Amino acid sequence: MIKGTARKYYMLGGKGGVGKTSLAASLAVKFANSGHPTLVVSTDPAHSLSDSFAQDLAGGTLMPVEGVDLPLYAMEINPEQAREEFRATTQKEGGSGVKDFMDSVGLGGWVGQLSELKLGELLDTPPPGLDEAMAISKVVQFMQAPEYDKFSRIVFDTAPTGHTLRLLSLPDFLDASIGKILKLKQKISQATSAIKSAFGQGDGPDKATDKLEALKEKMIMVREIFRDKEATEFIIVTIPTVMAVNESSRLQQSLQKEGVPVKRLIINEILPPSSSDCKFCAIKRKDQKRAMDMVAQDPNLRALQVIESPLFDLEIRGVPALKFMGDIVWH
Ligand SMILES: Nc1ncnc2c1ncn2[C@@H]1O[C@H](COP(=O)(O)OP(=O)(O)OP(=O)(O)O)[C@@H](O)[C@H]1O
């Protein structure tokens, strides 16, 4: 995972509470320790990344992880706060502030093009996947803004399962919508010049179409990244319980359907070996073994490389603890 200097994206996904944040943070520390300028991104409203690194990383901007001499940055996007800002702006300014807001989250380019083309209505009603759009907008920012050029590893502590899948299918949805708009526009521009001006607002129809095409290209770029086997890996995180394994199996099935590259499955919180199990531990160990056997037999999961991560006897908080975890899990 540390080989090569080309940029790689790692996305950790799975059921709530299985250890995504801890594992994403420990992987980021591991990458940074290996010399990779690394960025870890979270869209969890609960500020779990701040908790994990034991420092305030909130604010939605690039934050250096303090107290370590590592090329390590974190970014915590709070989707709830972003949604509130969105609502406030649209209410206050009757929708005209949408561009300012979207500018602030890095979607400005898209919105600029959309509103010029009078397609801003698409964004006036925030779609259910706005949280995911935030994350995607940041991905687009990574690819475009020079301050992100330096990162060779980008780790996402993704939202729980359902959100993650929406995130992955959103570019497809937008791509399809724009395709439809393009077709519609072509039809209309052939029909009447009055309707033509509603789309173009002074721009010739060709220029407007170019802009839409450029917008579509950008979205395709995001989608390609999610599906690029060379650049991206989605790592499923699970724990050794029947419920978590079943959910991971369904997640892997949907990711496969979306064409998202998955190679590894982490089973987190495995009881460490012991020669003197108490009754509780012995029962628990048996229970965990049953769930792990399920992984080995599951048609969706059995082909994945399994990484075992032990249950630690202390809470993993702060860089030294994350390094400790990372050295055990990611080797
Ligand atoms: N291997 C482990 N050993 C001991 N504690 C762990 C381990 N992995 C995670 N934890 C603890 O479990 C809790 C949940 O972990 P974490 O926040 O990383 O999960 P998550 O999947 O990101 O949760 P959410 O879905 O709520 O974002 C934290 O208190 C964390 O310290």
Image: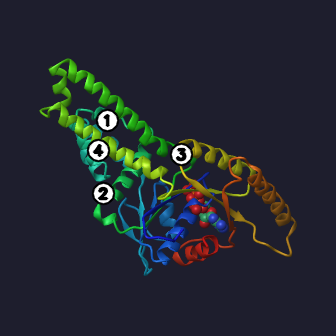
Name the element at disc 1.
helix
Q: Which residue is mark 3?
A: 259
Question: Measuring 59% from the left and 43% from the top, which residue is drawn there?
Answer: 254
Q: Which mark is nearer the camera, 2 or 1? A: 2
- Marks 2/1: CA distance? 25 Å
Q: Which mark is nearer the camera, 4 or 2? A: 2
Three-letter amino acid code at the position of disc 3: Gly
Quarter of the image with the C terminus in it: bottom right
* Residue 212, image x, y percentages: 27, 38
* Residue 307, image x, y percentages: 66, 64
Q: Are marks 4 and 2 in contact (CB under 8 Å)?
A: no
Three-letter amino acid code at the position of disc 1: Asp
Q: Is residue 313 above or below residue 20?
A: below
Q: Nearer the viewer, residue 146 or 104?
A: 146
Q: Which residue is mark 4?
A: 110
Q: Is residue 266 visible?
A: yes
Three-letter amino acid code at the position of disc 2: Gln
Question: Measuring 55% from the left and 70% from the top, which residue is drawn there?
Answer: 26
| First in residue order: circle 4 vs circle 2 | 4
- Residue 154 is left or right of residue 275, and the answer is left
Could you classify mark 4 by the number of other residues whose Cα lies within 10 Å: few (under 14), some (14-19), or many (20 or more)?
Answer: many
* Residue 124, image x, y percentages: 31, 35
Name the disc covering residue 144, or none: 2
- Residue 214 is left or right of residue 41, and the answer is left
| First in residue order: circle 2 vs circle 3 | 2
Q: Is residue 80 visible?
A: no
Name the element at disc 2.
helix
* Residue 156, image x, y percentages: 48, 59
